[in-house]
Image (cartoon, helix red, strand yellow):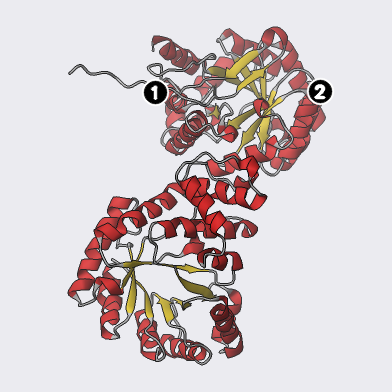
């Protein structure tokens, strides 16, 4: 008997989120099939997108194999962002690490002004991550939202302790937000439900936290995979937001990645490919070579 | 379904203090309140009972027996406390709660059920912990029940406990426990069953716990669950169990059967029960806000 591969079709849709304004605008998500299930029915209107990182303060602990590429621009986020575009980044991910109260503790106003400069200087959408200090981010990110009003940034992380302040400002000034939860699908859903009481669901992306290969990547993988299944197969409206895999720093802080250039790049690329397979719609990477290799791989599929 | 009242429990701070200070009044009030609520057994959870296990257990059993004739469930992992408890039960045939497939339990605790001619809860736990799925749970319990039979304990005296884990931790485990109950009667004819119902809602915000426990009790009941260890002071749970809320039971069954239910035609309470059933079947992903979507 001839073998006939089964073909699945799905009834749920990942929400489509638009980032950036005007000619910069980029659509994320929108698929109604599981990731890379090109053998099933369904459409994937928007391919996964890649962001390269820019810091608003000089990087610490970056290995020479990455830092060397940006040596001439690390003190100028605008130039740095432009350089990333020459490497083919679909988006820029600006990290406002200068605002970290445990570090420079820069003012929200200064950070917001820098975000605005970068947003205006680039031709692609901008992601802005705060320092991760939930109290400071609750002040910094609303300032960024205000300074970049109408730019349609992707702002985060909004966590259960500070989502109200961030969502309010994002909504007022027309931005999307990143809802971040600590590697727990139930808490992820809870945060989305809370957010959606006041915030439009098609302006939210999920960051379930991305661990690096060898450092718990399988947890991130499982949660992303289940998020997609719950949204696409079971039509759970509170898990249908597209996913951002912010894996750059997690990969490059490992001793394996720091050990040598090729190994570092591979460490990041394998983590990125794995999380793409799990369902990530945006991946944030650090090494331009990672970006190039993974994009190439996706083309060959 | 047979109800085993869980309210005399060492994890409750009041109970722990009362036991330590030999405060008979508080314990007896709890026993009477549960008896009046309509439970069939009163569970006496002593925990590990490290200090004076024998004297403590005897005191607790006698204190409760002074105010009720209900049978007692002696709930401890300490074999010394267990033996003292079973020996002290003079009013009704007690329930040994619990033995398991763990080696120490099979050697030290399980034989007490034969020695004192009691009913006995046997859980699916093994030396390796809690088996992860229906098959391995079944394998474990079949082996332990066979061992118990060899000791002279008949299936009719055995109450199987599949071990219920919190829904907030792992929905699939909740489904597995339900599936286990569905087939238990076919695999081990004659055995009874019990389950620690409240563990289902551990980790869930306090005010939302009861509806999870109640709904799951009804779901288990449909598959022939014999008894549950539950909060005797939850009046709605008691009402559900005694057939006073047939419409809710019917709705839960419909949700279990995957019938289309128009939520808009239901009262808030009915809607909550339907949503909860879907969470407990893992058809809806759990979050603490499952009633709000």
Q: Quadrant of residue B28?
A: bottom right
Which label was assigned to residue A8? 1
Instruction: Decide: few, some or many residues near mark 2? Use Cα within 10 Å; few <14, some 14-19, many ≥20.
Output: some
Q: Chain of mark 2?
A: A
What subunit carries mark 1? A
Residue on which the image places disc 2: A147
The residue at 52%/29% (across/down) is: A247
Residue B203 shows in the view: no
The residue under the point 38% across, 57% down is B223
User: Along the horizontal axis of the image, is B121 left or right of A68?
Assistant: left
Question: In which quadrant of the rendered view does residue B146 lie?
Answer: bottom left
Q: What secondary structure is marked by label 2?
A: helix
Do the numbered discs 2 and 1 sit on residues whose CB atoms are within 8 Å?
no
Could you tell me how far apart the alpha carbons at marks 2 and 1 are, in whole angstroms? 46 Å
**Circle 1: element type:** loop
Give x and y (percent) for residue A76.
70, 17
- Co-location on one chain, circles 2 and 1: yes
Relative vertical location of residue B190 with respect to residue B31 in this rendering, above or below: above
Residue B206, placed above or below residue B23:
above
> Where is residue A110 drawn, in percent x and y?
80, 27
């Amino acid at each position: 008997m001839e073998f006939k591969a089964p073909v699945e079709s799905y009834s749920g849709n990942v929400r489509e989120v638009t980032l950036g304004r005007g000619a910069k605008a980029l659509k994320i998500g929108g698929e109604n099939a599981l990731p890379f299930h090109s053998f099933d029915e369904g459409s994937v209107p928007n391919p996964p997108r890649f962001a390269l990182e820019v810091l608003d303060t000089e990087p610490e602990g970056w290995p020479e194999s990455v830092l060397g590429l940006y040596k001439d621009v690390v003190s100028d986020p605008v130039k740095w962002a432009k350089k990333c575009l020459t490497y083919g980044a679909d988006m820029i991910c600006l990290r406002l690490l200068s605002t970290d109260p445990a570090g420079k503790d820069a003012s929200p106003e200064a950070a917001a002004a820098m975000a605005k400069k970068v947003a205006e200087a680039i031709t692609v959408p901008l992601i802005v991550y705060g320092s991760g200090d939930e109290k400071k981010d609750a002040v910094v990110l609303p300032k960024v939202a205000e300074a970049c009003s109408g730019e349609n940034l992707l702002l985060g992380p909004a966590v259960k302790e500070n989502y109200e302040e961030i969502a309010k400002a994002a909504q007022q000034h027309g931005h999307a937000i990143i809802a971040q939860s600590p590697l727990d699908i139930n808490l992820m859903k809870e945060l989305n439900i809370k957010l959606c009481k006041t915030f439009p669901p098609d302006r939210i992306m999920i960051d379930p936290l991305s661990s690096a290969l060898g450092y718990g990547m399988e947890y991130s993988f499982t949660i992303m995979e289940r998020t997609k299944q719950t949204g696409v197969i079971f039509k759970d409206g509170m898990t249908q937001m597209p996913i951002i895999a912010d894996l750059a720093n997690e990969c490059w802080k490992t001793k394996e990645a720091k050990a040598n250039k090729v190994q570092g790049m591979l460490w990041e690329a394998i983590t990125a490919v794995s999380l793409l397979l799990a369902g990530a719609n945006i991946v944030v990477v650090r090494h331009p070579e990672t970006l190039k290799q993974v994009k190439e791989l996706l083309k060959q599929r | 379904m047979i109800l085993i009242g869980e309210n005399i429990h060492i994890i409750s701070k009041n109970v722990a203090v009362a036991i330590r200070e030999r405060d008979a009044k508080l314990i007896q009030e709890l026993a009477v309140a549960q008896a009046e609520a309509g439970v069939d057994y009163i569970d006496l959870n002593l925990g590990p009972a490290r200090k004076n296990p024998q004297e403590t257990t005897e005191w607790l059993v006698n204190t409760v027996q002074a105010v009720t004739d209900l049978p007692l469930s002696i709930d401890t992992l300490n074999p010394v406390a267990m033996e003292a408890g079973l020996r002290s039960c003079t009013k009704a045939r007690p329930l040994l709660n619990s033995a398991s497939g763990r080696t120490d339990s099979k050697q030290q605790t399980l034989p007490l059920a034969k020695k004192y001619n009691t009913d006995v809860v046997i859980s699916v736990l093994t030396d390796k912990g809690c088996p992860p799925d229906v098959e391995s749970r079944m394998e474990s319990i079949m082996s332990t029940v066979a061992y118990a039979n060899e000791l002279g304990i008949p299936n009719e005296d055995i109450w199987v406990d599949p071990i219920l884990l919190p829904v907030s931790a792992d929905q699939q485990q909740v489904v597995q426990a339900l599936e286990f109950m569905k087939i238990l009667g076919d695999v081990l004819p004659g055995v009874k069953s019990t389950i620690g119902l409240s563990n289902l809602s551990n980790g869930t915000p306090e005010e939302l716990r009861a509806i999870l426990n109640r709904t799951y009790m009804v779901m288990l009941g449909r598959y022939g669950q014999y008894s549950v260890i539950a909060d005797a002071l939850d009046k709605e749970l008691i009402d559900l169990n005694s057939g006073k809320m047939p419409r809710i039971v019917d709705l839960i069954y419909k949700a279990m059967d995957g019938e289309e239910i128009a939520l808009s035609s239901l009262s808030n309470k009915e809607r909550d029960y339907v949503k909860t059933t879907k969470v407990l079947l893992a058809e809806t992903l759990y979050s603490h806000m499952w009633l709000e979507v």
